[in-house]
Image: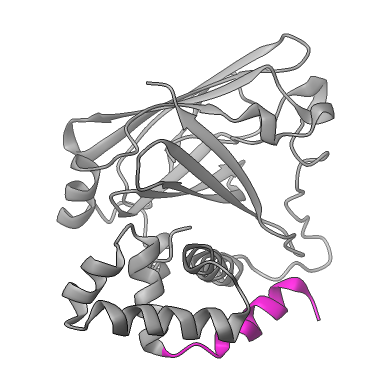
Amino acid sequence: MSAIETDRTAFAVLTDKEREILRLLSAGHTVKTIAAQLGRSEASINERLREARRKTKVGSSRELARLLAAQKIRDDFSGLTPALGAGQPSVQRPHPRRVAPKGTTMLLLALPVAAAGLALASIQQPAGAGSSPAATAAAAASPLEGTWALDLASIPAAERPRGVTIAFHRRPGGKWAVHVEIAAADGTAQVADSLAVPDGAPVPVSGTMSFVDSASLRQPGPNTLVMTLGKGGKPVSTRVYTVSKDRRVLTETIVWASDALPGLETTRFTRVG
């Protein structure tokens, strides 16, 4: 049984109420605010979370919420990717895991950027559907705005770039402007820019990063952005960006587009501006 199938089996034992609580938790809610929203006591919410951890054997409630959301994204993403047959090339995952040719890291194939355990079935709504009032409100209050730098210490030395930064800035009309800079280990530099409404519609990616040419964005919550990257009309990866409660750490969870999805990859960024 694959790791993906094992995860799905583990999550199948959760009740609908446990899933709902985990989705709220991953969206940035606390036990106190979840209890208020659901009309339950904090003790009851904590007991539900303990039971969910016991069933899945995951030690942290927030980690369980992240894993559940990531599984949801994998299911949605794989359901939107046709089965590959003869004569239909797969979208190959870059190799090695985080470094492109000449030492260029593949950590950030992108641009505007649950795990955010949210209902993400709408992540691939038809292009041009328009941003919702909820998405616009989420952008207005988002702790994602600012500049983030890759935590280099968490990257193996052989794969470590000199630096990677992402800057998110809000623009009129509910749009996100995203600027990415990658300084590779060999001294070469690449940049990329995009401007997108979080409505799932693809937008062009400009700059010097040749491995992607489009990105689509959704924002299911104030502290979360979900981004699908493409090249030549084919999906490359889906990335989930989640900000910690103290707004100092940005976690990136990557799901690669492939006929055989690998395990999730996670990287960390810290706020520098």
Does 6 appear in magenta?
yes
Identify the residue at image location x=32%, y=47%. 198
Identify the residue at image location x=43%, y=46%. 216
> For the view shown, which residue lies furthest in the front direction?
43
**Along the viewing direction, whichever of 269 and 164 lies nearer the viewer:** 269
Q: What is the quadrant of residue 255 in the picture?
A: bottom right
Give the x, y percent position of residue 228: 51, 49
Give the x, y percent position of residue 129: 27, 56
Give the x, y percent position of residue 45: 32, 80
Identify the residue at image location x=35%, y=42%. 246
Does 162 appear in magenta?
no
Q: Is residue 27 visible?
A: yes
185 left or right, relative to 230: right
Give the x, y percent position of residue 219: 33, 51
Tell me which secondary structure the magenta stretch mostly adopts.
Answer: helix
114 left or right, relative to 136: right
Q: Is residue 201 visible?
A: no
Number of numbered discs visible in the structure rendering: 0
**Along the viewing direction, whichever of 211 and 256 lies nearer the viewer:** 256
67 left or right, relative to 62: right
**Along the viewing direction, whichever of 126 and 45 lies nearer the viewer:** 45
Q: Point out the image quarter for the N terminus.
A: bottom right
Q: Compared with residue 175, is residue 216 higher up or lower down, i.e. above or below?
A: below
What is the basis of the colouring in this image? one colour
Identify the residue at image location x=44%, y=41%. 113
Q: Which residues are magenta?
A: 1-15
Q: Compared with residue 259, is residue 101 higher up or lower down, i.e. above or below?
A: above
Q: Compared with residue 183, is residue 64 higher up or lower down, i.e. above or below?
A: below
